[in-house]
Image (tube, helix red, strand yellow):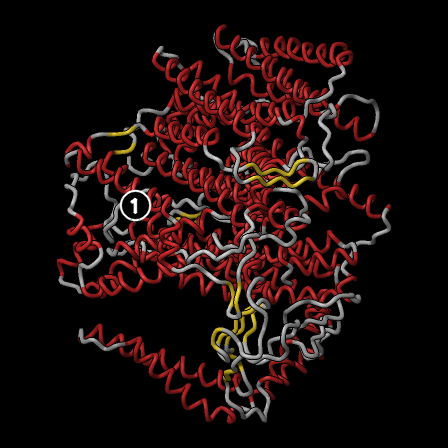
Amino acid sequence: MSNTDQATLAATQARRPPFYRDATVLKWLAQVVALLLVLFTLFFLATQAQGNLEEKKIATGFDFLGTALGSDLGSGIDTDPHTSGRALLSGAVNTIRLAIGGIIAATILGVLVGVGRLSSNWVVKRMCSVFVETMRNIPLLVQIILIFVVIASLPRVEAVGEPIHGWLHLSNKGVSIPRVHISDGFYQWLVFLLIGALVGRWVMRRRLRLHDDTGRETYPVLSFAAVLGAFAAVGWFAHPIFGWVGAIFGLVADIIDSLSQTVVQAVISALAVAAAVWWIRRFLARRRTPAGLTKLTDDDRFRIIFAAAGSAVVIVVAVTVPSLSSVLLDLAGGRGIDWLRFDNGFFGWLSEKFGNGRTGAPIDVKRPDIEQLGNFPNYGPSGLNLTQGLAAVYFGVVLYTAGFIAEIVRGGILAVPKGQTEAAQAVGLRRVTMLRRVILPQAFRVILPPLGNQYLNLTKNTSLAIAIGYTDIVQVGQTVYNQTGKTLEVVAIWMLFYLACSLTISVVVNFFNVRMKIVER
Amino acid sequence: MGLPMDPVAANVDAVEPWAGEAEPAQKPEEPSLSARQWVRQNLFSTPFNSVLTVVFGLFSLLVARGLLNFTFSEEREWDAVRTNLRLLFTHAYPEEQYIRIWVCVGTIVVLAGLSVGLLAGRGRGVSMKKLSLNLIGVGSAVALGVVLREPSVLKDADGEVLRDDDGVLRESFAAAMADRWAWWLAAAVLVGAGAALWHLLGDERRRKTFVPSVEMFVALVGLLVASAWVYPWGHYAFADGEFIAEPGRTVAMTTKLPWTVMWVLLIAAIATGRQLRRAGAGGGVRVALNLAWLLSPFVLYWVVLRDPALDWGRVATVDIPLAVLFAVGGAAVLWLLTDPRIGELGRIIATGLVGVAAFNWVAAFFGWYSMLQKVRLSFLLLALAALLAHNFAGERAQRLRLLGGWAAVTAVFHYMATIMNTPSTVETPTEALIGGFAVTVIVAVFTLLFSFPLGVLLALARTSKLPIFRVLATSFIEVIRGVPLITILIFCAVILKLFLPDGMSISLIAAATLGYTFFSAAYLAENVRGGLQSIRRGQFEASDAVGLTGVQRTVFIVLPQALRVSIPPLVGQMIATFKETSLLAIIGIFDLLRMANSVIPAQTQFLGVKREGLLFVCLVYWIFAYSMSKHSQRLEKKLGVGER
């Protein structure tokens, strides 16, 4: 820039427009007005709600979580919860179980169908596309209710289970299959697995380096699996030697119990400040160029202020709501929470699970049995019992999501450029190797983000259980607010729960997404 | 629920695996294979393939057999669906007012016909090859179904099913096949027609001759309508609580006459549309048609279906003068503000108007003076128009067009505000005016109409450079997308009432529509955002260089391109919303699903009969969702998104 140019620029900058025509002022004015409008609307609605609630003599607050609930739940970790809080927890566990089981099954089925749609076999191709078109074009709720009704029309439970006694029972009360479950010494065995994984990782790295150096096939993944397997096999019998781990956790629990809630408040505040500082420093580091810090825009400043304000809000909440800190303390340490019927906190629970004297097999399998004919508790406690409602939601959600996943998988595979296939063939790769090494890694990159969306949708769709009375968190929440009238609070709990689920899934998917990304230059 | 559309997947019809982006139009046409060659290539090309064919073939036959036996079992009481069709589609809408429903259907048919006549017909239609193959396929499927379905049960003279110790008695397989001669005949006719078409036309003509799809559709509907007059489909109804089932008759006059009229209307509308196109009707007609589509849901629901009892005295003394006042006064203000020479003064006037509009609400909050809500809203409308007016400053003709637009908007707004505030004269035994499938469609359509502008605004706010707007939009979108639809619906149905000021109430359907609108808008905003991000920087720079204002750049340059890119996901969102309307049943609205799941099983004749109704609901949803998704795939190909 020449000197004259700079002079004109300076002159233009010096001649600022009047404030009511200044773009910056107007921009911020508009935003502040919009913000005030939104805040005012929220405030207005809140005062209305408060007035209306007072009129109906309904107090707000989360005290109801500890009060008694007058009804049982059909299924879940606790079918006879004494408090609303425990009932909601039981519902939440049901939702999480449904979601995890559903995600696994829907992924397997969806990938199979998606690959099947690309098969060169006409029958397979047709079957898969009929499946996809049927599942995707019928509302999930209708499917769930239909499955529910069809299960209800199956024959009653007889003395001999149908169709395969002792393995698979189908009846109007649901489905029962063998159950694989964590047993006595599982947690000590877990320590073995952990050590095995570490050693296996070390071995795998060595094999990989050997492969890079010599070009020989060294089977790194296989050797990892072998090491892990060896540790698992030894640990299956030797796990009681880790009985002392529980004592360490017990010690940690005691230390946490001895802390006062002020310490927790201080820790939370410090963490909030640290997080904000870390974020701002990273942000500024990104804005730094070799020539020095670039000029910050309004937007950048706003982001920094926003981060600082966020940490301030966390601190204010931590300080003004001390009960939150004490609940956290109870949850972490060994005291536990009464109304949730947690006898221990987290570390107390760990010390119990890792404790001495657990010498049984880590994992156990039980086959289904029949307890009573015709009436409700007809399947015994041994098998994995999917009650009518659980089976309907589970199969509905799995089939429906599998239809969408199949389309995503198909699209991802088709998105791999044809040149890649041709190049792989030209190099002389076998079909399986080509799929494994060339097509799938590239397809996976396209598939992953929409797949994460489908997992999210599946988790949210389990809430349709409310239509058939399966006790997921939404259905339990409805029971709770029908009894206590605390609709607002229950909706807040729902939202927090589902937002937490969404966040978890997106963090996990993002983790893989970043790892799969093409590294460019 | 997610998007059924996947931009990549939907675009590819290629059959071979890993074929990449095969472009069907450019692919050289392969000559038809002989049946033997086809079977060898597609079913038994390798030993593994042969095994797959046998295993999956058997499996699919088993599934088909199970479905057939389930659907056509003697235990199914399909009468439950047949007699309750009205209930399923309109719930308790009164019999004597049914003409209103037909007017609505007729309006939609006419509009659709006009659109088809005006716009469609450029496609080539269905090739003879495809047609004959489809005929053969359907015929074979019918034949297969006839064989697979288990033999019918034996009945005695009273129609009671005969049983022995093992269960019901069935006729022998040979007797069953002989009994189904009519089905055999139908299958033979279909296969024969397909085969004849195939062999009469040579390979070349088979591929190059096309049957226009519009004509084919109209002819098929015509056949169906004609059969209603001739074939004894049976007369089933549930009139005045009385159960009518007369299998041997043709359908009732109240069914076949309206449908015949609809069919005639459809033909007339298509013909008119084509005539208009041939006569070179330009953008004007198209704009009018689009406007008619846009306004039809409002008019059909609030005017035709509700038949509001207008107080004409009040209309003449209050409503019309108000509308005229706002139309004329607003036009004068806008005329002034669009004058290119007005400069600073225009902004001051516009700001003043915003102040007035805002003050009206403040006054309402403190109760200083009373005012009709519609007047407050009109002031707000005027203030918004005034704020945006300088973007339309220009020549006389352009300004006049803007004034015309203002007058039209005011007229429509005041008309709708008046109509909506007038009670309905159609009396139904239920709280809601209409239920069944109609309410499904109504909620879906209004959700679409409201969520589109909201979604676009949210997307613009989320991509804007202004941080507070961005934070507000982002948090709204992410919170809504993070929670299940049902919790939002429950919030709207149960809790929204708590937030309303005294004296204000909201009907369940309106609350549900609001919930759907929020949910759909959040998803829609993400789709539009994808479109917005696909726009090149150069477009922004170019529009800045020409000196467009921010609003002009957004409305005339950015949005048209962004929306074009996001049409496929938007249609996907539309289908998702349509399917999600089934959740209405959970919050207590009598929609299609609730009819089948709770209302029909509660009737004394059909106690506990659920499966039939639910299968019917599946069918209805499937037909609509499937045809929409097929249409969107064609649309995507036509737009050539991703191919430029």
What SS does tag 1 mark? helix
Q: Which chain does the numbered disc 1 sit on?
A: B
Spot the residue most to the top.
B396
Which class describes the residues within 10 Å of circle 1: few (<14), some (14-19), or many (20+)? some
When asked about the image quadrant of residue B212, the answer is top left
Front residue of B599 and B14: B599
Query: Where, quadrant-wise, is the C terminus of chain B in this rendering?
Result: top left
Residue A263 location, x and y as percent? 70, 71
Number of marks in the rendered image? 1
Give the image location of residue A285, x and y in percent: 45, 53
Q: Residue at x 54, y 93 (%)?
A: A359
In the foreground, B343 or B418: B418
Q: Quadrant of residue A423?
A: bottom left
Disc 1 residue type (three-letter): Gly
| For residue B160, above or below residue B78 | below
Vertical side of B554 occupied by A519: above or below: below
- Residue drawn at (57%, 45%), measured in percent from left and top? B79
Q: Is residue B544 visible?
A: no
Label 1, on which residue?
A: B137
**Residue B215 showing in the rendered view:** yes
Query: Residue B531 location in percent, x, y?
Result: 42, 37
Left or right of B571 in this view: A45: right
Q: Which of B564 and A220 is in front in this view?
A: B564
Q: Is residue B459 left or right of residue B14?
A: right
* Residue at 30 percent of width and 40 percent of height: B190
Instruction: Left or right? Give the position of B516 relative to B291.
Output: right
Instruction: Give residue B608's position: percent from left, percent from top.
Output: 63, 54
